[in-house]
Amino acid sequence: MSERVSAGTRFHLVLPAAGSGQRMSADRPKQYLEIAGRTLLQHTLERLGAMDCFSSIVLVLAPDDPWWPDIESQLASALQKKILVVDGGAERCDSVRSGLLALQAKAGSNDFVLVHDVVRPCVRQSDVRLLMDALSDEVAGGLLATPLRDTLKRADDAGRVAMTVDRARLWCAATPQMFRYHILRQALEKVSVENRKVTDEAEAVEALGYQVKLVQGRADNIKITYPDDLPLAALILGAMD
Ligand code: C5P
């Protein structure tokens, strides 16, 4: 990693996993669906938890999540000890805010926080390092993203093409997203006070007027959203192991 990160700057990981995953139409939240005998949550936790760069790992779960105790008991004890579990909120941004609050006593204001959706189990450690290295000099931070591959159509109410959107300079936002602790806290507090919904951290930070850097990551860092994402993730994970 770059030496430009000033001595003493630390990295903390926040993993929002408090969603219900309704679009998946499964009998459990999607983070508890399995690929090759391990839940998505385990795949993500074990890969990122194996990196020695994180000073803290905060896992944000739904209050009274009934699936976690069994999963926790299957984790290596060193990893179990490193994870701080906190309750999430109604929206993803509420869950991340709760994770940040839990870091209050641990994180310096200029420390970086990486927020990663646990339902992106195919994230590579190399992409995480790439992100950390690319953002070390940034005032606020940035995110992994991929340039849009497909031609983009905007639909009208009847489901017909209203227009073709120029894809030049369009990117798909992924995670981890990495920001200075004090900036992300401030950004998400503002979102909460204004009762706005944002679907990623970057949007909240952008709204404060900061520049947010895009770092090109791998396109196979997919988010599990619909049932047919699972077999694709299984293929990607199979090729990684
Ligand atoms: O629903 P979506 O795919 O956008 O969720 C992305 C991530 O945010 C998931 O890991 C999900 O568990 C988490 N989430 C959360 N709290 C919520 C909603 C979603 O932690 N209220």
Image: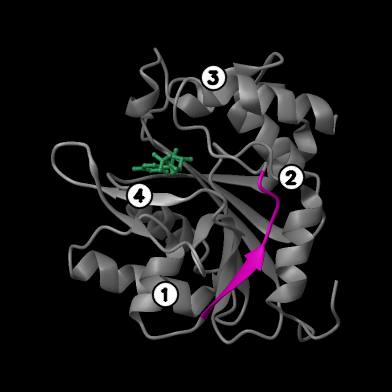
Residue 139 picture location, percent across and down: 57, 87
**Residue assigned mark 1:** 205
Q: In the figure, 175 relative to 189: above or below?
A: above
Q: Looking at the image, can residue 186 be seen? A: no
Residue for point 26% across, 57% down: 197
* Label at residue 16: none
**Residue assigned mark 2:** 49
**Residue assigned mark 4:** 153
Q: CA distance from mark 2 to mark 1?
A: 26 Å
Q: Are marks 3 and 1 in contact (CB under 8 Å)?
A: no
Residue at the far left: name it. 157
Q: Residues within 10 Å of mark 2 (few under 14, many from 20)?
A: many
Q: CA distance from mark 3 to mark 2?
A: 19 Å
Q: Which element carries disc 3, helix, strand or loop?
A: loop
N-term mark: 2 or 4:
2
Q: Is residue 135 left or right of residue 53?
A: left
**Residue assigned mark 3:** 33
Q: Looking at the image, can residue 167 be seen? A: yes
